[in-house]
Image (cartoon, helix red, strand yellow):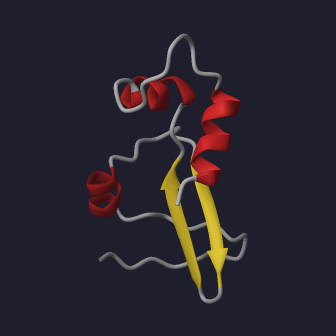
Amino acid sequence: MGKTEMDERGRVTIPKEEREKAGLRSGDQLQVKATKGRVTIEKQVDLNTFLTELRGCITVKGDLDPLRLKEIWRTAP
């Protein structure tokens, strides 16, 4: 686990070792989520990459509309 400090403008530098472990690169889009006393940063997945990695996991006849997929995921237990 790396240590860092937030500056007066709210910027945080993620230590190089942690960036490498997470596969983060300059220019990557990140999602930031704050909960009580904790901030989570995750690499935002490109929709096309996500759908490519998902191929074969869900079998349906014809094309699967991304909004339909989102609906399926919301109702999954």
Please provide percent x and percent y for residue 42: 50, 56
Give me the residue at 63% from left, 67% from top: 33
Q: Quadrant of residue 39?
A: bottom right
Instruction: Looking at the picture, tell me which residue is in the foreground, 60 or 49.
Output: 60
Q: Nearer the viewer, residue 76 or 20?
A: 76
Left or right of residue 33, residue 62 in this image: left
- Compared to residue 64, the image places residue 2 above or below, namely below
Task: Farthest residue to the front: give it.
Answer: 61
Q: Nearer the viewer, residue 14 or 36?
A: 36
Vertical arrangement, residue 55 with respect to residue 29, above or below: above
- In the image, taking residue 69 as reference, residue 45 lies left or right, namely left
Residue 4 in the image: x percent, y percent?
45, 77
Using residue 6 as the reference point, say whether residue 19 is left or right of it. Answer: left
Residue at image point 52% right, 61% down: 77
For the N terminus, the quadrant is bottom left
Residue 29: percent from the left, percent from the top? 57, 42
